[in-house]
Amino acid sequence: MALIISGKTTCKICNKRLCEQESIIAYPDVCYNENDPIYFFSGGIFHESCFMKADHSPIAMNILRMVDREAEKKICYISKTPITIENVKHPDNHIYIGYLISDRDAPLYKYNYIHVNKRYLDSWKGKNDFLHLLKAQSNLEGWSPLKLLIKRLESPLAPPLDPKIIERVNQYLERKK
Ligand SMILES: [Zn+2]
């Protein structure tokens, strides 16, 4: 998530500084395809009014809603178990794929918005197929941002956090509700 510093961060559309009193949209970094119109919005910060007037803003808004809605679901695609700190043992072992591809006919389409608990990755029969599809896609023109996702999937598991820290994370999350 992008960091907003009042009076310093500028709107990606009008280039004017953002103030605390203004309605702003901080778009999550969710797009892996540089040729997708959504790529412009990904990771950017905007005045809400600039965002709403921009080309492709309705579709960008739809994707933002999907990303947020699916982010809440937090069920591992592989194991069907909940994504909790106890299950992933370390936040880095949870990967939320988010918005992957818009083409409904693409084999990768079914992996849009999935959550992965990396602890189950090696036991997953579909692992090689999934990685193969991602790698083939990442070699296409404009898809190099996908390489970062592949790196995150292929990197070693983060070591389990101390159970005492897990307890404190849970207390923190409980308070945030
Ligand atoms: Zn603006």
Image (tube, rainbow, N blue to C red):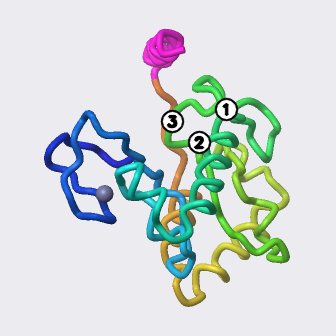
Question: In the image, residue 9 lies at what x, y percent?
Answer: 21, 51
The residue drawn where x is 24% and y is 35% is 20
Secondary element under disc 1, as helix, strand or loop, is loop
Label 2 – label 1 distance at C-alpha: 7 Å
Q: Is residue 161 above or below residue 15?
A: above
Give, as a three-letter code, the residue at label 1: Ile
Question: In the image, residue 68 lies at what x, y percent?
Answer: 61, 42
The residue that mark 2 highlights is 94
Q: Earlier in the sequence, mark 2 or mark 1?
A: 1
Query: Which range is magenta?
Result: 162-177
Q: Residue furthest left?
A: 7
Secondary element under disc 3, as helix, strand or loop, is helix
The residue that mark 3 highlights is 91
Secondary element under disc 2, as helix, strand or loop, is strand
Q: In the image, is 36 to the left or to the right of 116?
A: left
The residue drawn where x is 20% and y is 58% is 16
Question: In the image, residue 4 lies at what x, y percent?
Answer: 27, 43
The residue that mark 1 highlights is 83
Give, as a three-letter code, the residue at label 2: His
